[in-house]
Image: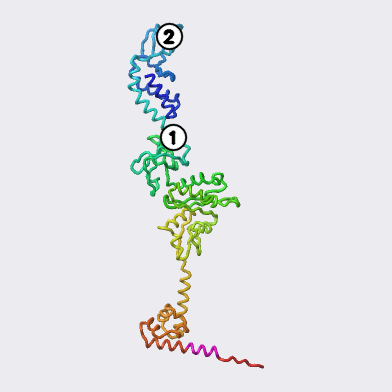
Amino acid sequence: MNAELIATLDYLEREKGIRREVLVEAISSALLAASKRSFTAGTRNLRIEINPKNGNIRAMAKLIVADPVRNSHDEIAISRARLLKLDVHLGEELDVEVTPRDFGRIAAQTARQAITQRLRQLEKEMIYQEFKDRAGEIVSGTVRRFERSDVIVDLGRFEAVMPGWERVSTEEYSVGDRIRAYVVAVENGSRGPEIILSRSHPNFVRRLFEIEVSEIADHTVELRGIAREAGYRTKVAVFSSDEKVDPVGACVGMRGGRVKNIVRELNNEKVDIIRWHPDPKEFVKEALRPTVIKSIAMDEAKKELRITVAKEGLSLAIGKRGQNARLTARLTGWDIDIQEDKSREEALESQKAQAAHSLAESLCLSEEDASFLASAGMNSVEVVAMSDAEDIAGILDGDMKRAAQILATAKSLQKDALQQQNAPIFSVGT
């Protein structure tokens, strides 16, 4: 038992990193609890002593010297006590070895399970003590196994769990894969401490930027906001109070080297780096680049920004399934309403309406027929006069007789206009 115990202590101290003194104390407590029932006498203030060098185990009790002995559990006869200490007195407390003859067998049989349980507790305490202040850091580990959708990650001496909801939906893991993850929390629950990891948390991207970009680490550049849809796209807002420092350029790095490293770690997730601005209008313009914004209306009470963009830029601004608009809203903290800019179409419709009204008055047409002609491009008397009756009839339900009348009227009006234009101008002198 002694040699085996020493070998076990050496192994646990070396491989598990548990101090020998802690192990000896744990084993002593375990042996005390496991072997109390084997003692028939001398159990007052019972304790177990283990020599950490040679592994010798002794059971010691603090007994009271008595004559005669009335309680064998608490007292020792003075005749026996004098064998241990010559000048002992009645009533004196004396440390006495009370190790049973079969104690080695008892220790070997009953202590192993208790020791194992205590060591598990110690390991859990060590996990909590080591990781309780590491929430918010990035750690590296190896995928060990899967429990339903949860991924169990081996961090070396400890295991951590990445719950299904903290995984990235576009990523697949295999046993043995080396991964990096963000420590969301270290929880000390009823089942012991549990290290919760995440690869989908927005702060995973934040920590990657802090590691990769030295200007962020030394606070020359600040990360003012992150919005992320893990596996697809992330928007990061950066700012620097130093006018000489380009915060976007610092994060991108030489030839894009810094951001490429981050994108590689994120398995090619798209990362947009945006210059933060205190003005919400300017900030949202930066966040929606390269979309050209036609106008922005701000409703401060509702904290809403109504944005109009050209028709060809609408899909780019909104993004696939509204992703770009959603991320922009999260990043800026404002509700975003993106709509197509219809001012050009409205102006064109207004011009058509004016042209139709003018034709209706000039050619004595109904507003409906004048609108049909204007919509077909015949938006003035001059254009109608230069057209063919067949074209006019084609627009107005094929009525050739009516078309001929309209054409004649238009030509007459054009002729009168030309005559007035070419009429001589007389001046009257005095």
Q: Position of residue 228 (x, y in %)?
A: 45, 51
Q: Is-magenta flag for residue 269?
A: no
Quadrant position of residue 399: bottom left
Q: Residues within 10 Å of mark 1 (few under 14, many from 20)?
A: some
Determine the secondary structure under disc 1: helix
Q: Which residues are magenta?
A: 413-422
305 or 45: nearer the eye?
Answer: 305
Left or right: 249, with 88 as reference point: right
Dots 1, 2 in contact, CB < 8 A: no
Q: Residues within 10 Å of mark 2 (few under 14, many from 20)?
A: few
Quadrant position of residue 80: top left
Tell me the quadrant of the picture where the N terminus can be found: top left
What main secondary structure does the magenta stretch of the protein show? helix
Please determine whether, in this image, residue 409 is positioned above or below residue 168: below
Give the residue type that dot 1 points to: Tyr
Between discs 1 and 2, the one toward the N terminus: 2
Q: Position of residue 335 (x, y in %)?
A: 46, 57
The residue lying at 46 percent from left, 34 percent from top is: 130
Tell me the quadrant of the picture where the C terminus can be found: bottom right
| Label placed on residue 84 | 2
Q: Is-magenta flag for residue 414?
A: yes
Q: CA distance from mark 1 to mark 2?
A: 46 Å
